[in-house]
């Protein structure tokens, strides 16, 4: 029978893991025409997450896990899980049960025939989110589509089921600074988007603050677009044109009409404007340079300390 690997990044999820395991087992019972393995990745949790994973692996051979030496982030955990997965089909989902496990049935039906290479969940309702957070998500989708050549679907989530060929394509991209949503889109393949209504967390608290989401969004835009660098050049030309026009107007007004040239306020305003633009774009250039620096180091994206087979 085909094997489905379910990749689940975990960070301090001890409160929800027992319920998640029960839900996955229930779905596996409904899909008795396929085999399952559950690839949990403990992203350096400081609670009892690892102990629960050890217990599950001891009583259920379908459960596999790896535990990081420290917290490396969700992107690293997803990569580790994809590398662990041995299935003909590989699913990626969150541990908090906001991604309904029963959707795996619909996803599998979408990809098993070969018409689609991936079935992915698209969130259609952001009930419970603040207006700032939901508005920011919509703005991010628009900016990603405007700045990059990679299509970004509004409401797209990491929850998806992929055929092995697409998984291998994703794993072929070894970059250190990873934005997996963009990578899923960049590699192509035919994707069926399945709408769903987001649920509340089954237990525990979200690990994503507004500032973390903002930094993640900026990293995503920089990972798949160099247009901000081109924008700095365009604005530089525009500023030069405005400066030349202002100089011409000032000369004409002074020589022909005898109007006095505005002094202190004009100079200070121009210095602040130009200085602010320079600092902004130097900072942007520095961000790109920093990412290039991290790529050039060739450091491992994560370090595994323990698996279901024992300590490394």
Image: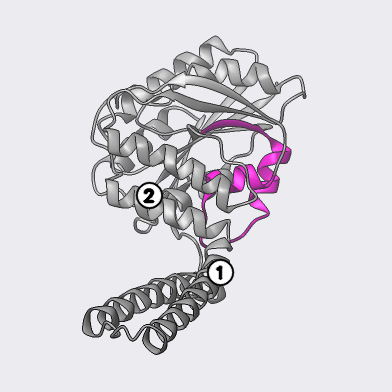
Q: Is residue 305 visible?
A: no
Q: Which residue carries the number 1 mark?
A: 234
Residue 205, horizontal then vertical, whole percent: 23, 36
Residue drawn at x 35%, y 55% as measured from the top left: 71
Residue 233, horizontal then vertical, whole percent: 55, 73
Q: Is residue 27 visible?
A: yes
Magenta span contains residue 185: yes
Would you place residue 182 above or below residue 18 in this image? below
Q: Earlier in the sequence, mark 2 or mark 1?
A: 2
Q: Quarter of the image containing the C terminus? A: bottom left
Q: Which residue carries the number 2 mark?
A: 43
Residue 299, horizontal then vertical, whole percent: 51, 70
Would you place residue 278 above or below residue 196 in this image? below
Q: What is the quadrant of residue 48 in the picture?
A: top left
Q: Quarter of the image containing the N terminus? A: top right
Nearest the eye: 50 or 175: 175
Packing grade of label 2 (10 A; few <14, some 14-19, many >=20) is many
Q: What is the quadrant of residue 57 in the picture?
A: top left
Residue drawn at x 31%, y 44% as measured from the top left: 208
Residue drawn at x 36%, y 37% as measured from the top left: 135
**Mark 2 falls on what kind of element?**
loop
Q: Residue furthest front?
A: 257
Judge from the rendering whether residue 121 lies leftward or rightward of residue 68; answer left or right: right
**Mark 1 falls on what kind of element?**
helix
Residue drawn at x 39%, y 73% as measured from the top left: 277
């Amino acid at each position: 029978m085909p094997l489905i690997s379910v990749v689940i990044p975990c960070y301090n999820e001890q409160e929800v893991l027992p319920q998640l395991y029960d839900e996955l087992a229930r779905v596996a019972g409904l899909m008795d025409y396929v085999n399952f393995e559950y690839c949990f990745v403990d992203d350096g949790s400081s609670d009892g997450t690892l102990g629960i994973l050890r217990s599950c692996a001891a009583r259920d051979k379908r459960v596999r896990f790896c535990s990081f030496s420290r917290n490396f982030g969700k992107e690293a955990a997803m990569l580790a899980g994809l590398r662990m997965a041995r299935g003909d089909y590989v699913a990626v989902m969150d541990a908090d049960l906001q991604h309904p496990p029963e959707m795996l049935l619909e996803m599998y039906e979408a990809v098993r025939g070969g018409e689609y290479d991936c079935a992915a969940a698209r969130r259609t309702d952001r009930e419970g989110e603040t207006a700032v957070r939901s508005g920011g998500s919509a703005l991010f989708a628009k900016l990603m589509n405007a700045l990059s050549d990679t299509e970004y679907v509004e409401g797209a989530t990491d929850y998806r089921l992929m055929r092995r060929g697409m998984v291998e394509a994703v794993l072929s991209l070894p970059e250190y600074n990873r934005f997996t949503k963009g990578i899923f889109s960049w590699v192509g393949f035919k994707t069926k988007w399945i709408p769903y209504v987001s649920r509340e967390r089954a237990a525990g608290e979200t690990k994503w603050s507004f500032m973390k989401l903002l930094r993640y969004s900026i990293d995503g835009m920089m990972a798949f677009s160099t247009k901000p660098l081109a924008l700095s050049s365009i604005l530089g030309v525009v500023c030069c044109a405005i400066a030349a026009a202002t100089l011409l107007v000032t000369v004409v007004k002074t020589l022909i009409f005898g109007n006095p040239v505005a002094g202190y306020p004009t100079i200070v305003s121009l210095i602040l404007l130009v200085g602010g633009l320079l600092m902004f774009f130097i900072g942007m250039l520095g961000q790109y340079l920093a990412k290039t620096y991290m790529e050039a180091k060739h450091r491992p994206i994560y370090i595994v300390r323990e698996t279901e087979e024992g300590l490394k």
